[in-house]
Image (spheres, rainbow, N blue to C red):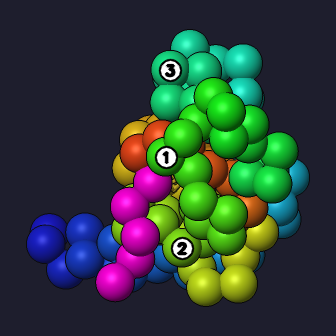
Amino acid sequence: MSRTRRDVLVMLPLSALALPHAHAQAMVDEADATAKALGYLADASKIDKAKQPKYVAGQQCAGCQLFQGKAGAAAGPCALFPGKQVSAKGWCISFVKKT
Ligand code: SF4
């Protein structure tokens, strides 16, 4: 019945919030192939500007359009890393400033 399906969809975000952090999605590993290809680092302040000329100090995942975490969250999903979370303080070459 469609009503049941809708109820389940409504409840999903609430149950996700109730989960302790340890049960949240895994963090992106900097050593992952995709992370390496995108130059992702969990701590943007460690970006080597010589290697990443695109990086501008102050840019971080929390301020990126592809970041799907809540405002103020330490981590959140990113469209480029399905099923994983990136650090709000991270950065990669696909950074697009939130407008
Ligand atoms: Fe962070 Fe944006 Fe790169 Fe995703 S696309 S890892 S949110 S900088």
Q: Are the residues tagged 1 and 2 within 8 Å (C-beta)?
A: no
Vertical side of 27 occupied by 34: above or below: above
* Amino acid, disc 2: Gly
* Amino acid, disc 1: Lys
Asked where in the image residue 89 lies, by quadrant, the reply is bottom right
Helix, strand or loop at label 1? It is: loop
Residue ID for mark 2:
63
User: Label 1 to label 2, Cα distance in Å?
Assistant: 15 Å
Eye-nearest disc, 1 or 2: 1
- Residue at 73% from the left image edge and 52% from the top image edge: 44
- Residue at 41% from the left image edge and 45% from the top image edge: 94
Residue ID for mark 3:
37
Q: Which residues are magenta?
A: 95-99
Asked where in the image residue 62 lies, by quadrant, the reply is bottom right
Query: Horizontal and vertical percent for residue 99?
Result: 34, 84
Helix, strand or loop at label 3? It is: helix
Helix, strand or loop at label 2? It is: helix
Query: Horizontal and vertical percent for residue 85?
Result: 63, 49
Query: Horizontal and vertical percent for residue 66?
Result: 40, 60
